[in-house]
Image (spheres, rainbow, N blue to C red):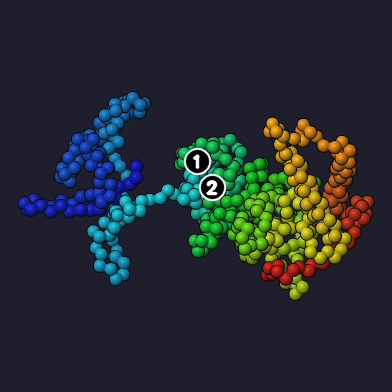
Amino acid sequence: MTEVWLAATTFQHEDNTPGVTVPVTVEGSSRVTCAHDLLDIRSADVPYIRDTAKLRSHIRKLNETITTAGDPAQVDPEVAVTVRCEWLPALLLVGFEPHDGTTADFGVAVKSLVALRHVDSPKPWGEAAENEALADAVVDEIERRQLITTNRAGWLRGALTPDQAVAAGFSDDPSVRAAAIVRLFAERDQSIHAAVRVAITGQSTRKNITTKLLLDVASSLVMRSVSEEDSRKRERMRKYLRSAFPGELAKEWQATFRGAEELAQAALEEVAKGEPDVATRELAARSAYPLVVSGQLTGDRGSSNNDQPDRRHPGEVIDRMRSTLHGVHQLKQTLLDSSMGRRARKVDETGQITQNDDGRDILVTDANLRCTFPPAGEGPPLTPAPRNAAEILGNALHDLAISIQAVEGAVKVVEAVRADDGTRAVDSLGADRADCEAWRSILQDVLFKLPVWQQRSAQRHGILIEDAYGLDANRDEEREDSDDAFDGEPTDKDTPASDEVA
C-alpha cells in the first residue's frame, strides 16, 4: 500500500488525433500495470476510457456484492481481487522549482527522484518518529472514546500555545503538561488502558505493552514543549528524557495543577512519615522535564573523559531524590527556578540555596546530583576535608557502605568456588565453625544497630521538616535526642571551585 507517484502527462499523436492529458505513474508503474492485468484492462487503453457512467455502475455492483456477502470472508475471491485492484494510494507531483543556478527541468527532477527511490530506498522509521506516531494514535483513540475532551487532547498533543492553554483552563508550565502526559500513558484505569492498547497494537506489531514502552512514547509528546534547537542536541535530549521518568510512575498517583510549593509540602510530609507516595511521584514526573531539558541531569555518557562514574538512568536518580527530604527540597527548587526561566540552583538539606565564597548561587550539575543522592546502600557522599562531626560521620558511614559491599562481593566469591562435580564447594565442605560463630556475632551486632540509626535519622529529619513549616515546635524530647546524635551539623556553605554558579 505504498503510494505510487503520479505526474500529469500529455500524449500527442502523429495521426493528428487530439492529445490527451492524464496522470501517469513515474514510480510504481509495475504495480499499476499488474493491477490492470488482473482487471483484464490494457494499460494503453486507460487514457482513453471516458465512460464515467459505466465506471460508476461497475463500482456500484462491486459495493452491492460486498454488502450482500456480509462477511468479508464470504466474498467471491475474484470479486475481492477486483475490489483490491480498483484502488491504490497515490501522490501527485504538481510542480518543480529548480535550485538556483541549475538548468534541470521537471523531467530530469522526476528521473532523479525515481533513481533515489530505487538506489537509496526508504529506511525504516527511526524510533523517535515511530514513538511520535504512536503517541498521536494514543491521544486520538482516547479522545475518540470521549475519555478526554478535545481541548485536553490538543493540550496533550502540544497543539495549544501557552496563552491558548491558559484560556482553555490548562497550565502553560511544560513540566505540569509533562506530568499529565506521563500519568495518561501509565494510567491503570481499565478504559484508558484499553484505548492505549488498541492504539499501539493498531499502529504496530507489538503485542506486549510494557511500562518502558509507554513512558518512551509519552516522552515523545513531552518533547513537543522543547523549543527547536540543533538536531544533535535535540536528539540527545530526547534520548535522556526517555529514561528520565522512573518506573515508579506506573503506580497510583494523580497529575494535578497545584503549585510547586503546595506539591512539595505534600511530598515532604510523605517522606517525613517514611512513606513516599503519590505526591512524590507527581513531583518526580514534573521535575524530570526541567532537569533534562536544561542539561543538569543527563543519561549515561559512558566512562571516557567525563566526571560521571555513576551509570544510573536519570529516572533512577530522580526516584532516589524523591525518597529523601533533601531530594524533595532540590526537586521543589528545580520547579521554582524553571517557572522563572532559569536553571535549578543547589539547596542544602533544609532547602536553603547554597552559595560559594563569593556569595553567588550555585547551580546543580549532573555530577553533583549523582554524588549528593547516591544509590541506596552506598552511604553518604565522601567529604574530602571533613570539618565537623556530621561530615566525619558521613565519611565513616561511606566507608561502612563500601565494606558491606565488599562483604557481599566476598560471599559471592566463596559461593562461586565449585567442587569436582560442579556443585558449590562451600555447600559440601562448609567453613570453620569458630569462624562462622565470630562472623555471625559481628553481623548480628550490626543488624541490631541499623534500625536504631535509622530511627534517629527519622527523628532528626522529622524535626527539621516540622520546624521549617511550623507544624509542631514543642517536641523537646526528640529535639534533645536529635541534637545529641548529630552534634555539630554542617552549616558551612563553602563549595569547591569546580561547582557551577549562577
Residue 217 is marked as 2
Q: How many other residues sit within 10 Å of disc 1, few (<14), some (14-19) or many (≥20)?
A: many
Q: Residue 59, percent across and down?
A: 25, 35
| Label pair 1/2, CB-CB below 8 angstroms | yes
Q: How many other residues sit within 10 Å of disc 2, few (<14), some (14-19) or many (≥20)?
A: many
Q: Residue 48, percent across and down?
A: 15, 45
Q: Amino acid at mark 1?
A: Ile
Residue 30 is marked as none
Residue 225 in view of the camera: no
- 112 vs 320, left or right, is left
Q: Amino acid at mark 2?
A: Val
- 157 vs 33, left or right, is right
- 271 vs 480, left or right, is left
Q: Residue at x 58, y 46 (%)?
A: 215
Q: Residue 308, percent across and down?
A: 66, 59
Which mark is first along the chain, 2 or 1? 1
List the residue tagged with mark 1. Answer: 200
Q: Residue at x 34, y 45 (%)?
A: 2
> Mark 2 falls on what kind of element?
helix
- Seen in the picture, residue 67 relative to 30 is either above or below; the reply is above
Q: Residue at x 32, y 44 (%)?
A: 89
